[in-house]
Image (spheres, rainbow, N blue to C red):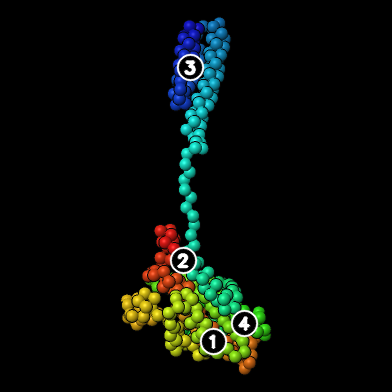
Amino acid sequence: MIEKLENIENEAMEKLSQVEELEELEKLRVHYLGRKGEITSVLRSMSQQPQEMRPVLGQKANELKEKIEEKLKEKEKEIEEKSKELLWEKERIDVTLPGKPVSLGRKHPVTLITEEIKEIFAGLGFRSEEGPEIELDYYNFEALNIPVDHPARDMQDSFYFTPEILLRTHTSPVQVRVMEKQAPQLPVRIIALGKVYRRDDDATHSPMFQQVEGLAVDRNITFADLKGVLLHFAREMFGEEQQIRLRPSFFPFTEPSAEVDIFCVICGGEGCRVCSHTGWLEILGAGMVHPRVLEISGYNPRVVTGFAFGMGVERVAMLKFGINDIRLLYSNDLRMIKQF
Ligand code: PHE
């Protein structure tokens, strides 16, 4: 029996010193120390040994067990160290290798147009204002002279949080917010750029889009001032040759109201598919601020007048850059952004 233990020891030590992988090591552990392992079976067969030999054998077997355990631990550490070193070797950084190029970000076409619009109007003395995208029904509709049963209030067109709170459907509420704050001081001359929301989604409508609101209030402001400002804008944005055309229209918050077209930028007014062969493209709605809106916002409509307009920013960007689907602007496709 003693001899057997010695054999086990020699064999175990030799095998253990040759092991190079954790898996093999585990196999050996099971082989010697496992439930059916060699040492275990020696300990189990103890009862068949002569009484006086048992303590000596038991001690020996236990000593061997400890020795193997120790060796296993030692080996395990060794193998782990080695694999760490290998990994380190593999991951070592070669500082002489060329770097990966970092591609630079670009401005989105809508951002580019936004900046250009702000600049053009700043040149005419319009300062930039902002209003909340989550708006009260009061500012979005009521103060703009849009009665409760007006079709523009249709639940189909707006995203409501509660009956009183919604995502603004246009930037016109900023007119009221600005006048309310500034009244009765003159002049008011602002633009308000920002996101607006409607329940629409197709090639020319997105559920979120951006508008620029313009507002000028002072003594003696006329429709001619509106026309002059819009013509100046169209020429700065689309070129010296640009023309504008005003068509009578209706908005509850302006009177009179107009829709404003520019020469089709694709065909230059000749007529093409984009302009449905009319030569003209609509870019904004405008008009003289309705007396009720002036009054509700703190100005006396018998003393002051004003004009307002609201323009689709994506529309301008699409025309300027020749983009034919509004959804492309919000597809987050870098191949598209990189062209500008
Ligand atoms: N708010 C209008 C719209 O979204 C546009 C507009 C603004 C019309 C200001 C007249 C004056 O359609």
Residue drawn 49% across and 67% down?
112
Which is nearer the eye, 144 or 40? 144
**Tag 4–tag 1 contact (CB < 8 Å):** no
Q: Type of residue at label 3?
A: Ser
Q: Residues within 10 Å of mark 4 (few under 14, many from 20)?
A: many
Check disc 2 and report its element: helix, strand or loop.
Answer: helix
What quarter of the picture does the C terminus occupy?
bottom left
Q: Type of residue at label 4?
A: Val
Mark toward the viewer: 4 or 1: 1
Residue bearing the label numbered 4: 188
Q: Where is residue 276, by image quadrant?
A: bottom left
On residue 17, the disc is 3
**Tag 3–tag 4 contact (CB < 8 Å):** no
Residue bearing the label numbered 2: 109
Residue drawn 47% across and 64% down?
108
Earlier along the polypeptide chain: callout 4 or callout 2? 2
Residue bearing the label numbered 1: 225
